[in-house]
């Protein structure tokens, strides 16, 4: 965040971000580390919540299609027709 606007909003311009702090001759990466920690938290949360869900789907056999249907194509086996009209303009 721009140091002047950070000071107006929060009353302090101590942690303005890594790139703005370079212009001061400092290397304050607190905001960057907070964002990195947030990214790691989101990855961890998604892994913990979704892994059991997909394991249950895998064990119940819902994630795969029959090999015959896979060769024919999902358009014909599940939707009873082609997804694209290749006959040209009419």
Image (tube, grey):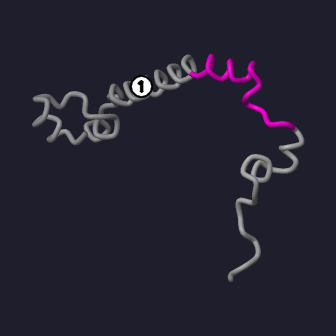
Where residue 41 sits: x, y (%)?
46, 21
User: Residue 12 vs residue 90: left or right?
Assistant: left
Q: Which residue is situated farthest in the front direction here?
A: 80
Q: Which secondary structure class fits the magenta region best? A: helix
Where residue 22 sits: x, y (%)?
32, 38
Image-quadrant location for residue 27: top left
For the residue labelled by badge 1, is the local secondary structure a helix, a strand or a loop?
helix
What's drawn in magenta, residue-wise? 50-66
Q: Name the residue: 75% across, 18% down.
A: 59
Image-quadrant location for residue 28: top left
Q: Is residue 66 above or below residue 47?
A: below
Instruction: Locate the N terminus by quadrant.
Output: top left
Name the residue nearer the viewer: 14 or 35.
Answer: 35
Instruction: Locate the C terminus by quadrant.
Output: bottom right
Where residue 48 sits: x, y (%)?
56, 17
Where residue 15 sits: x, y (%)?
25, 29
């Amino acid at each position: 965040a721009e140091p002047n606007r950070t000071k107006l909003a929060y009353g302090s311009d101590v942690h303005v971000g890594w790139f703005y702090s370079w212009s001061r001759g400092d290397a304050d990466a607190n905001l960057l580390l907070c964002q990195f920690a947030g990214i790691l938290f989101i990855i961890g949360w998604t892994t913990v919540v979704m892994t059991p869900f997909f394991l249950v789907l895998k064990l119940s056999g819902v994630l795969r299609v029959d090999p015959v249907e896979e060769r024919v194509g999902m358009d014909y086996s599940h939707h009873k027709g082609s997804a694209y009209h290749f006959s040209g303009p009419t």
